[in-house]
Image: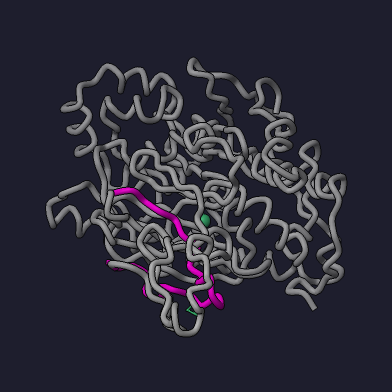
Amino acid sequence: MADGGQDLRAWDRAQLLALFDPATGALDRRVLSDEALYQLELERIFARGWNFMCHDSQIPEPGDYFISYIGEDQVIVVRDEEGGVNVLLNTCRHRGNALCRAEQGRAKSFVCSYHGWNYALDGRLIGVPGLKTFYHNDIDRSRLGLARARAENYLGFWFATLATDAPALRDYLGDVGRTGLGMICANGEVEVVDGVQKNVISCNWKIAVDNLFDWYHVPYSHASANTAGFLDIAAIQHPQSQMVMLGEYGHAIGGPGIPRERQDQIDAMSDEERAAASRAAPPNSPRIRPRAARDLMGPVGVRSEGHPNIFPNLWITLGGLQMCLRLPRGPSKTELWWFTFVPKGAPPALRRAMIAQANHVFGPAGILEQDDGENWSQSTRSARGFSSRGLGQYIGMGLGHDQAVAGEDGEHYIESAVGEHGQRWLYRAWTEWMAARDWTELKANHTPPPTGPV
Ligand code: FES
Ligand SMILES: [Fe+2]
């Protein structure tokens, strides 16, 4: 029996598109529990999309590697002798053993622990024990190198895809994805803190993703954080506080936005004045970004104080202090990987303070994620029940009440009260990715970011 207790039947295009209705906000709960849909996600979403691997600072020298995933395919992200970065499937071409067991490190080559085949940092098969004796020199090593993914980086963030026909990373990210990564670098160059925090939650990966657009749950789910003085809910959730940016292929940013009038005042300030105003602000207030941030985030993006998600599963937390991968581990299980970024060469006291802040907000010890994880698990569990999965979910908040407008650089955004525009955009994109057989179909049939009533 499949994880979700349902048949492993094939889904056709019309059925896939019907799983979410953007006109009503009705979501079929099988999206969160069906094993056949999950297998199709691995193929049509994870293998096809650009997946975040790691940051340049994690693999600075030749031989440095970091183990990551494209869906459930484990990969070695490794810098070679020439300084290039290779993303290699971590599976030996002999009998499939994993080549690299450590989560990160430095290697001269990768030797399989089963029979000793040896692979260079670029994946070439360079050593086969018994080449003459047992194989009689009758083996074509050039055809048995490690399988490779395409790898590209933007601002030092490495991504990989298994789709040869995927657009270039920069085009895939579009303005919203680039704004998201720009948010991390808005205050200058960054590096990853050693030690990616990893934990598993019994939830479907999309529940964890859609929650980052959800600012409706904050006062209720996180009431204790408000009571403890950790959050000022009144300040972040007043009416018309929200700015949602919608990007191509399902990327989106949701959460508080800086009103245009306030941004006009900020634009008139020097970097010194911005730094002084940030120091004078109450604790936990978002830092005012320097002038250079506008180049990285665009004129609309720079007003965002929300959460970007780079489709499918890369969340950048507000302020760009952390990012979190929601890695699928079956329809009902998600592995969360937390990366913390600090300014390159930050003084020890600042570095410590930023790490403490990161540890206390999100991640396995974070005060917020402890609340969230419980809700995600229960929403996922109920999607497996025979009767409850037939009920659907209602994602209709704000539907038909707001306007999407185009910014001066072509960004598409909605300024409104708290709503569910980001969640609808995610599930709409998900159905379109799932229904398309290849990138040609996806490019032709995906919904472009809208202008007008939403
Ligand atoms: S499985 Fe790797 S050498 Fe045999
Ligand atoms: Fe939350």
Q: Is residue 255 left or right of residue 283?
A: right
Q: In this view, does 273 lie to the left or right of 338?
A: left
Q: In this view, does 27 lie to the left or right of 337?
A: right
Q: In this view, does 161 lie to the left or right of 350?
A: right
Q: Where is residue 48 in the image (x, y as percent from the top left)?
A: 62, 48
**Image point (54%, 62%), residue name:** 327
Q: In which quarter of the image is residue 155?
A: top left
**Image point (70%, 43%), residue name:** 438
Q: In which quarter of the image is residue 250?
A: top right
Look at the picture and state if 142 lies above or below 431.
Answer: below
Q: Where is residue 312 in the image (x, y as percent from the top left)?
A: 58, 49
Q: Is residue 100 covered in magenta? A: yes
Quarter of the N terminus within the rendering:
bottom right
**Image point (75%, 57%), residue name:** 31
**Image point (43%, 75%), residue name:** 128
Q: Position of residue 378 (x, y in %)?
A: 66, 69
Look at the picture and state if 6 lies above or below 158.
Answer: below
Q: Is residue 380 covered in magenta? A: no
Depth order, front residue of 147/309? 147
Q: Quadrant of residue 99?
A: bottom left
Question: Does residue 367 show up?
Answer: no
Question: Does residue 287 show up?
Answer: yes
Look at the picture and state if 349 lies above or below 14.
Answer: below
Depth order, front residue of 146/236? 146
Helix, strand or loop: magenta stretch: loop
Quarter of the C terminus within the rendering:
top right
Residues rendered magenta in the picture: 83-107
Look at the picture and state if 147 lies above or below 175.
Answer: below
